[in-house]
Image (cartoon, helix red, strand yellow):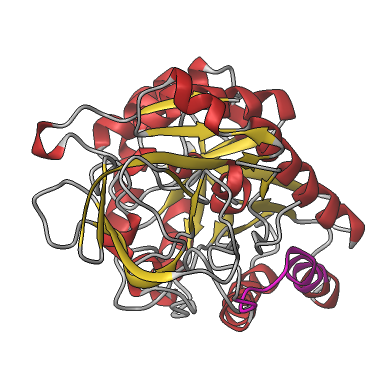
Amino acid sequence: MAYINLINSYLSYNESTLCLNNHSLDEYTKNFATPFYLYDLSIFEKNYQSFIAAAQQVGIKEFLTCYAIKSNDHSNFLSSVKNLGSGADVVSIGELRKCLKSKIAPENIVFSGVGKTDDEINAALVETNGKLKCINVESLDELASIISISELSKKEINICLRLNPASPGDTHEHISTGGTDHKFGLLEFEINQALKISKKSKFVNCIGLSMHIGSQLTSLEETKGALKTMNEYFQSYPYLKIMNIGGGLGIHYDPTSNSLCSLEDYMEMVSSFINTNKLQSKEIIFEPGRFLSGNTGVLITKVIRQKRFFRIVDAGMNDMLRPALYDAHHEIYPLKKPASPNNKEELTIAGPICETGDFFINKKSCYPVIKGDFLAISNVGAYGKVLSSTYNSRSLIKEYFI
């Protein structure tokens, strides 16, 4: 095993080279042109089973896990979702259609998203025959559209109201979603209106509430506050039977950080909340994304130029946007095993895109690398390829599977 701390990444060094889940990565550079994504779906399956086991361990019985498709929508991941018996959380008609093509049952699909068009809502009803688990409603305007469309189509549809609990979440401002200044969800006075309006509809069934306060959460405190707000509605409206508490569990991008809450602590909090408030009869929906897919993959790239403290690689921000978009941290490891764990230098590993912000690390301590070396950017299974583009008229990056 490695002498380098590669926490929760399934990365390790053998005698000479970096491995993902004990698979030597240098073998793939012989067969595939860089840059490329490489995944191991067995890691995804282990993460899913760990998530389910953690919920069951603390006595959570009535629950559905809906994988957040936006984190990685490759058809191979969706096939695993189907085979595992998981549900799916989608945010567009395109994601919904990918799930249906992969034979994921519509009864296990939650349709989220703050900007669903009328055409998307209508298509979702028609293509699932109204059998979606639910549509998560994000505005009174959207609710009016759903009621109108359901009346015209004469199709019943289940909805949950997405509560914005005024808890912004302890995370980066661009992936925080539960504050009053954020575009997501309904504030409490709007929830009250929506409950009254939906009661009058012949075809729309309001069956629960949902929430999602952000991604890569580092603390449980904001989630506890949001759950407390949500509970008030379940006590006042006992006919609500689904409590969708969203996702947001983070992963260890930085092996030196211990700031994340553990899966076990998260599930213990949820279980305690359910038992304290006598909500055992409610169905809980979880929407993990990054927690399931984040550590399943690496981005393999090659150093193509070097000057001063710069190492220019052939992957760019169009291939992996997170560092430029969020100032996100991803550990980078040479495929060739470093001679010493303490031999490091300050480098900027940058891409070829004509943008100053096109770098993966900027003047940070890392292992010495030179032109011709292959590198692995870690923990890119979530929000990697799905955010890629053809900026600078570059080809879309390819994906491969172990």
Magenta-colored stretch includes residue 260: yes
- Pick the residue in front: 84 or 292: 292
| Residue 220: x %, y % from top left | 64, 78
Q: Main secondary structure of the magenta part?
A: helix
| Residue 384: x %, y % from top left | 40, 44
One can see residue 225 in this view: yes
Residue drawn at 33 percent across, 53 percent down: 114
- Pick the residue in front: 354 or 265: 354
Q: From the viewer's perspective, tell me whether residue 163 is left or right of residue 83.
A: left
Report the span colored magenta: 257-271
In this rendering, the answer to whether 109 lies above or below 381 is above
In this rendering, the answer to whether 253 lies above or below 130 is below
Q: From the viewer's perspective, tell me whether residue 58 is left or right of residue 277.
A: right
- Based on the displayed image, in which of its 4 quarters is residue 359 positioned? bottom left
One can see residue 199 in this view: no
- For the C terminus, the image quarter is top right
- Pick the residue in front: 229 or 44: 44
- Pick the residue in front: 277 or 73: 73
Q: From the viewer's perspective, tell me whether residue 354 is left or right of residue 22.
A: left
Residue drawn at 50 percent across, 32 percent down: 38
- Based on the displayed image, in which of its 4 quarters is residue 2 positioned? bottom right
Q: Residue furthest front?
A: 339
In this rendering, the answer to whether 130 lies above or below 226 is above
Magenta-colored stretch includes residue 18: no
How many labels, in total? 0
In this rendering, the answer to whether 52 lies above or below 277 is above
| Residue 377: x %, y % from top left | 45, 49
| Residue 291: x %, y % from top left | 61, 53
